[in-house]
């Protein structure tokens, strides 16, 4: 008698818990559907009615595939059977797009979470379904806006590069008409400076990364440009470039002054380091740490005529160097290489983690 009473109490308590569980599902803010091992719908909450446009009594006892677009039903049946055999709480369809089917025949994208439930009637599966139509629409708008921005920036950098090429051509034409050697050299210097800026926009255009420039790639390409321009000036001298195997990026706002800074240091060495013989000009770029890179331009040539800081040197290029270093937020030091000269430029780097 006592045993029977206890069993009755346990059964009654379990019944109350199941009633509370069903009530919680009914009041849930998301569509909740409970199915049995045969794939039949046994519970269809109010939000599911709003989502699929069915009344609960219209789908109870029917196959879950009723709510799945017809083209997906065979695969869905196989996946459902596999889940029943190995149930676990997890998202459904990882890496795949899922769609539901409303009573009016319209399809809509969904996210589904599956949870196995043990009930008096046996093993059940609770499916929590979220209509993500609005989210996908917003994501599509964002993707379209980003695509439009990319196309626009691509066109801007392409046009800037082309306009700079026109300026280079005009300067070249002017150089060819100049008889005064000093004036010719000044125009050629300006031409190289414009080339250094054009290369920035060329790399942005080629890489389709409009927010930053990889300095190692820039220096390598700029070195090739200088060799084609100053081949006769170098004579038997060499320009050796060593860059870090690890990418070193600088954001767009500082890329142009940084390119100009590199130009001034390297062209100064090419023109003045070895006027009478062979020698090597070194350009080295290394990453010191996550926040700082070191650019070194050095030679063992004649050195600076005036043992002073670049800002006091009469050369326009060397006067620009500290100004450009300040613009990129860096610092520059000039050392006597005994013989020759060594310039060291500390360049603050992009915080890659924050950029991501």
Image (cartoon, rainbow, N blue to C red):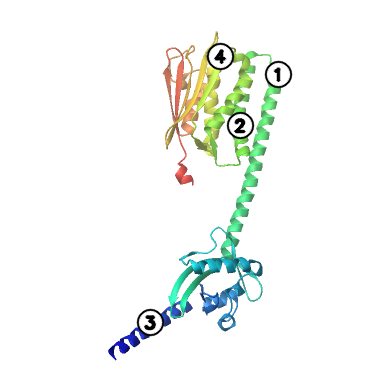
Q: Mark 4 points at which residue?
A: 237
Q: Give the label on residue 176, or none.
A: 1
Which of the marked residues, 3 or 2, is nearer the chain's N terminus?
3
Determine the residue positioned at 71% across, 22% down. Answer: 173
For the residues labelled 4 and 2, say whether their Cβ atoms are less than 8 Å apart. no
x and y, in percent, of residue 89 in the image: 45, 66
x and y, in percent, of residue 2 in the image: 28, 89
Left or right of residue 158: residue 307:
left
Which of the marked residues, 1 or 3, is nearer the chain's N terminus?
3
Q: Give the label on residue 80, or none.
A: none
Which of the marked residues, 4 or 2, is nearer the chain's N terminus?
2
For the residues labelled 1 and 2, say whether their Cβ atoms are less than 8 Å apart. no
Q: Give the label on residue 14, or none.
A: 3
**What secondary structure is marked by label 1?**
helix
x and y, in percent, of residue 36 in the image: 51, 76
Seen from the viewer's position, the closer of residues 59 and 278 is 59
**Residue depth check, mark 4 versus mark 2: number of the one nearer the observer:** 4
Which of the marked residues, 3 or 4, is nearer the chain's N terminus?
3
**What secondary structure is marked by label 3?**
helix
Q: Which residue lies furthest to the bottom in this view?
A: 1
**Residue depth check, mark 1 versus mark 2: number of the one nearer the observer:** 2
Q: What is the distance, in whole Å, between disc 4 and disc 2 at their CAs?
A: 24 Å
Compared to 143, does 203 lie above or below? above
Determine the residue positioned at 47% across, 39% down. Answer: 350
Q: Give the label on residue 199, or none.
A: 2
Q: What is the distance, in whole Å, between disc 1 and disc 4 at their CAs?
A: 26 Å
């Amino acid at each position: 008698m006592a045993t029977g009473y206890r069993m009755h109490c346990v059964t009654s308590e379990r019944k109350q818990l199941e009633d509370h569980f069903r009530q919680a599902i009914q009041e849930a803010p998301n569509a909740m559907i409970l199915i049995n091992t045969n794939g039949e719908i046994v519970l269809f909450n109010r939000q599911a009615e709003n989502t699929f446009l069915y009344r609960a009594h219209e789908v109870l006892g029917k196959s879950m595939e009723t709510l799945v677009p017809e083209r997906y039903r065979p695969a869905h049946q196989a996946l459902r059977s596999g889940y029943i055999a190995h149930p676990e709480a997890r998202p459904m369809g990882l890496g795949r797009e899922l769609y539901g089917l409303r009573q009016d025949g319209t399809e809509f994208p969904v996210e589904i979470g599956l949870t196995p439930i043990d009930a008096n009637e046996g093993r059940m599966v609770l499916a929590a379904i979220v209509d993500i139509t609005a989210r996908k629409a917003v994501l599509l708008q964002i993707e379209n806006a980003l695509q439009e921005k990319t196309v626009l920036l691509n066109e801007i950098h392409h046009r800037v590069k082309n306009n700079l090429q026109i300026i280079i051509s005009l300067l070249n034409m002017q150089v060819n008409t100049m008889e005064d050697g000093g004036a010719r050299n000044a125009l050629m210097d300006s031409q190289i400076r414009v080339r250094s800026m054009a290369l920035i926009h060329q790399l942005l255009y080629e890489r389709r990364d409009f927010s930053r420039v990889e300095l190692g790639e820039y220096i390598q390409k700029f070195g090739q440009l200088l060799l084609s321009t100053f081949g006769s000036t170098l004579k038997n001298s060499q320009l050796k470039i060593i860059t870090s195997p690890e990418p070193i990026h600088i954001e767009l706002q500082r890329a142009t002054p940084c390119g100009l800074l590199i130009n001034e240091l390297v062209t100064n060495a090419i023109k003045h380091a070895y006027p009478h013989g062979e020698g090597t000009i070194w350009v080295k770029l290394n990453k010191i740490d996550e926040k700082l890179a070191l650019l070194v331009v050095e030679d063992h040539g004649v050195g600076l005529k005036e043992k002073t800081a670049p800002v006091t040197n009469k050369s326009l290029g060397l006067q620009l160097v500290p100004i450009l270093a300040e613009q990129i937020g860096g610092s520059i030091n000039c050392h006597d290489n005994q013989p020759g000269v060594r310039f060291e430029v500390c360049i603050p780097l992009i915080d890659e983690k924050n950029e991501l």
